[in-house]
Image: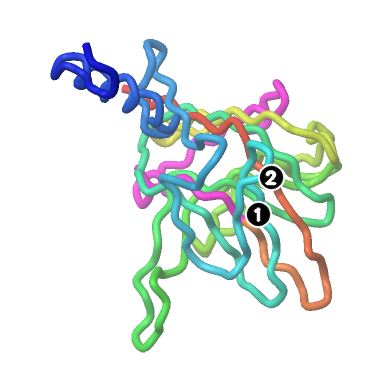
Amino acid sequence: MRSGWLTGGMAALLCVVCGFGIVHAADKPAGADGWVALFDGKTLKGWIQKNGTATYRVENGAIVGRTSEGSPNSFLCTEKEYGDFELEFEVKCDDKLNSGVQIRSKTKPVPRGSKARFGRVYGPQVEIEASPGEAGYIYGEATGRGWLTPAKDRKPHSYFKNGEWNHYRVVAKGPRIQVWLNGHKVSDLLDEQIYRTHPKGFIGLQVHAVPRGAGPYEVRWRNIRIRELD
């Protein structure tokens, strides 16, 4: 073989090897255990912002959401929709910032005359907030219902570790939504009503609105993965 030249077979093999080398984690097929990474640790590929002017960037292997003064709630959403699934992620949030992760969520129609690209995000949200608080309970973002977790089950706790990384596990199967926070089972919600309107939808990372003069605050997510359930 002369220097600088490859046979057709070798060239094809090289292309295949190189091609595998540049595949992002979010593009890989599910492994034997069914888990798929939603975030490749380097880019926001597979995600799209809906609502608000908060900013999202990638830093040190995490998605960082930063508040924008005067902005309404902002959401970085998966392009793909999910129905029944198991979701895991880690999150660290500034103590003064409220946040959350939307599941099975949708957007409302864009109001007539609005220049917005997307309507208002609405649907179930897994709460993220400092301790003592209500982290891990389920809120109905823009659904008109407020908390989906009943008041009798919504007891303040300190399972969320302020200023540290926190592990969430969410299982959505039919009308049942279960949430574990740092190994503690926080939510076990059975809600037929929200399941009728939201049987599937996108996953969304929320940066909550803040009053003028407040912040900026940040929330960080990493190791986001999902496994679809039969």
* Residue 153 seen in the current view: no
| Extent of the magenta region | 178-206
| Contact (Cβ within 8 Å) of mark 2 with mark 1 | yes
Q: CA distance from mark 2 to mark 1?
A: 6 Å
* Mark positioned earlier in the residue sequence (2 or 1): 1
Q: Residue at x 81, y 45 (%)?
A: 130
Give residue 24's quadrant in the image. Answer: top left
Q: Residue at x 66, y 44 (%)?
A: 59
| In the image, farthest residue toward the left | 8
Q: Residue 58, position in %: x, y? A: 61, 47
Q: Residue 181, position in %: x, y? A: 69, 29
Q: Amino acid at mark 2?
A: Arg
**Kind of element beneath mark 2:** strand
Between 154 and 179, the one lying in front of the other is 179
Q: Residue 76, position in %: x, y? A: 52, 54
Q: Please tell me how crowded label 2 is: few (under 14), some (14-19), or many (20+) other residues with Cα within 10 Å.
A: many
